[in-house]
Amino acid sequence: MLVKRLFITANLVVLMVPFLARGVQDSVQPSQRLDPTIQKIVSEISADRIAEIEKKLESFGTRNVLSDPTQPNHGIGAARQWILDQFKSYSPRLEVSFDTHVIPKRGRVWKDVEIRNVVAILPGKMKEATSRWIMIGGHYDSLNLRVPPEMRGDREKAAEIPAPGVSDDGSGTACAMECARVLSQYEFDATLVFVAFAGEEVGLVGSRALAKRLKEKNQTVQALLNNDIIGSEISGNGVIDNRRVLVFSEDPNDSPSRQIARYVKKIGERYYPEMNVDMIFRYDRFGRGGDHTPFNQEGFPAVRLTTPNENYANQHTPTDTFENTSPSFAAKVTRINAAAAASLAMAPKAPVTSRPAPLPGSDAAIAAAAAAELEEAAPRPPQTGPGLSRGKGYDAVLRWEYPDPEPDLAGFIVVVRSTMSPDWEREIWAGNVKEFTLKNTSIDQVVFGVKAVDKGGHESPVSPYVLVPRAR
């Protein structure tokens, strides 16, 4: 009874939050009706086209990154050239190129090898579009671990054995390509990037190299939606489930990646209610990883979309074929991707609820350290946020920053949830203001966030109010 009572109390705090904000009458909340453009985008995703892509990828025999890249119709080289040509055929507005890296011999990479991610960029129309990338990806390389005994001493021959890799991960590649085909017919505020990653099967080497390169260039990635194994609706034990997709996101509970997972769930289910988006609160399947992992490690928000029904008997074998996959299921997951990516690219940027800590040795850092010495509790690392305070003692006062607002910005929505809740439970229209007060509301018992919304009703991801852990 104690647990139940605590849960009810926490939710009552959320449900009974009073509505009071300075300047709340300054603007009118835009309608949250469905955007007809996004509805049209979702309807244009084709299961037949996804099937065609999967069959073509299977036809290359293998897409092992260590296979012969010079063959015109077989192996990794033929596959990546075909993907490049397909991207180019979708729209002249797509900027298509190879993202090339030389990977030295190590681990599963038994020789120095050149790998090529295939990248298609759809530039956004806003002036800050180059600093806001929304990415959709899947890996096009494949692997067959069932090497015949007579080839186990000959790595060159072993790299050429059939590795169809249709579910893992021709399905994710098909998702990225089909999204590129459809979305490239529209204009967006932010930049959309479609990627077919190479080298996932030999240690995430392609995504790792690209993430590192983007970090070095100070590129802002608002989200990576990584699709890996979205081609199967039947698990190895016979369970069929074609109404759910899993979205994995890294801890902690209010990490940027977790906010993207919540966004994918909300927008995906709004525009494609035939599917349930189930959030899984860990970075990937137990003890495993994917091409979103290096992006997380470089500080970019990234999530993995995958089937709830893996068939382990087919993975990395010659039986991961088109016959053993479901393009209709892959199309459903692709519609979730398209809706979420389009909404992100149409939406305003997210508000700033906290700023980075001042540089060590700076005046701000010295002042913060001096102030910390006056605290009886252990001091926090120097920082200037979050913008959450108690007001006169018993209120919740939220402040945020929003430099260079978009011309169509309508205002901001404050979101609230219990500390035990996986998702936001209440939304409150704050108006076009940068401060919001909830009277008689404890900041200790709930979690707060804020998001921007434009006049068309497109919402940014939530910026939560979080603290840096205390120094121990």
Image: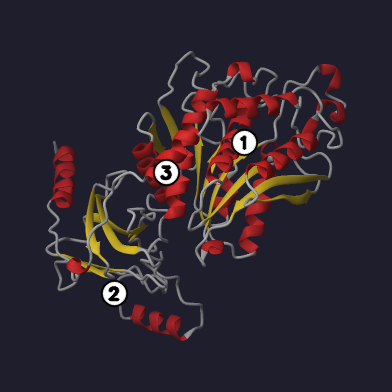
Quadrant showing the C terminus: bottom left
Could you classify mark 2 by the number of other residues whose Cα lies within 10 Å: few (under 14), some (14-19), or many (20 or more)? Answer: few
Looking at the image, do the residues carrying marks 1 and 2 touch, with CB atoms under 8 Å apart?
no
Q: Residue furthest top?
A: 238
Q: Residue 376 shows which numbered tag? A: 2
Image spot of residue 332 (x, y percent): 46, 30
Identify the residue position indicated by label 1 in the image: 173
Q: Nearer the viewer, mark 1 or mark 2?
A: 1
The amino acid sitting under disc 3 is Ile
Q: Is residue 442 left or right of residue 171?
A: left
What residue is drawn where x is 85% and y is 21%? 151
Visible residue check, residue 396: no
Image spot of residue 304 (x, y percent): 51, 40
Q: Residue furthest bottom?
A: 363
Question: Which of these two is toward me, 385 or 135?
Answer: 135
Identify the residue position indicated by label 3 in the image: 38
